[in-house]
Image (tube, helix red, strand yellow):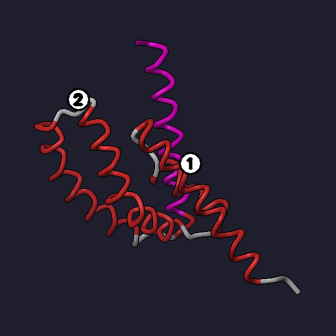
């Protein structure tokens, strides 16, 4: 018989470690939840795609986003007027994207998400060689 408290502790420790890595990458690269934590929750911890995405938003948007923003702001690496222009689009897009995500099956969401990350990664690689 498995000790459920041990397996729960290991699972929580693994999730904490994944979150720590995502937090470091969020501060370092401006990414974390969507590109790291969501896939880790889905692939390593068995979360459905929508559950992984929703959980990531709860954890990352307020604390990590604010702290990373402050670090970049103090280093004078923030264009506040452009950031303020981004807010309405992200706000409306977040609502629409969340509604759309909940109409899709977890399998379809994972496939769409994987293709999105693959294309985004390929674009980043290509642009790093061009510039």
Contact, mark 1 vs mark 2 (Cβ under 8 Å): no
Magenta stretch: helix, strand or loop mostly: helix
Q: Quadrant of the C terminus?
A: top left
Residue 17 location in percent, x, y? 61, 56
Q: CA distance from mark 1 to mark 2?
A: 25 Å
- Circle 2 packing at 10 Å, graded few (<14), some (14-19), many (20+), is few
Classify 20 as above or below 103.
above
Instruction: Find disc 1 in the rendering and name its residue.
Output: 21
Residue 99 location in percent, x, y? 32, 69
Instruction: Find disc 2 in the rendering and name its residue.
Output: 76
In the depicted view, which residue is nearer to us: 108 or 121? 121
Residue 6 location in percent, x, y? 76, 77
In the depicted view, which residue is nearer to us: 115 or 7? 7
Of mark 1 and mark 2, the one earlier in the sequence is 1
User: Which residue does the image show at 54% across and 56% down from the upper left?
Assistant: 19
Q: Dividing the picture into quarters, in which one does residue 74 lie?
A: top left
Query: Is residue 117 found left or right of 45 in the rendered image?
Result: left
Residue 63 location in percent, x, y? 35, 58
User: Which residue does the image show at 23% across and 52% down from the upper left?
Assistant: 90
User: Which residue does the image show at 50% across and 61% down from the upper left?
Assistant: 109
Query: Is residue 102 found left or right of 129 in the rendered image?
Result: left
Q: Nearer the viewer, mark 1 or mark 2?
A: 2
In the depicted view, which residue is nearer to us: 55 or 127? 55
User: Which residue does the image show at 48% across and 49% down from the upper left?
Assistant: 23
Q: Which mark is residue 125?
A: none
SS of the residue at dot 2?
loop
- Circle 1 packing at 10 Å, graded few (<14), some (14-19), many (20+), is some
Q: Dividing the picture into quarters, in which one does residue 59 lie?
A: bottom left
Q: Magenta residues?
A: 108-131
Q: Quadrant of the N terminus?
A: bottom right
Q: Residue furthest bottom?
A: 1
Classify 7 as above or below 31.
below
């Amino acid at each position: 018989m498995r000790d459920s408290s041990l397996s729960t502790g290991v699972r929580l420790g693994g999730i904490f470690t994944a979150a720590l890595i995502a937090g470091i990458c969020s501060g370092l690269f401006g990414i974390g939840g969507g590109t790291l934590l969501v896939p880790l929750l889905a692939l390593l911890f068995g979360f459905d795609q929508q559950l992984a995405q929703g959980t990531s938003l709860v954890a990352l948007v307020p604390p990590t986003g604010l702290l990373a923003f402050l670090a970049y702001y103090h280093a004078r690496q923030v264009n506040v007027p452009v950031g303020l222009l981004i807010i309405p689009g992200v706000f409306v897009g977040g609502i629409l994207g969340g509604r759309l995500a909940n109409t899709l099956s977890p399998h379809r969401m994972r496939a769409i998400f994987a293709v999105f990350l693959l294309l985004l990664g390929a674009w980043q690689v290509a642009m790093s060689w061009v510039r």
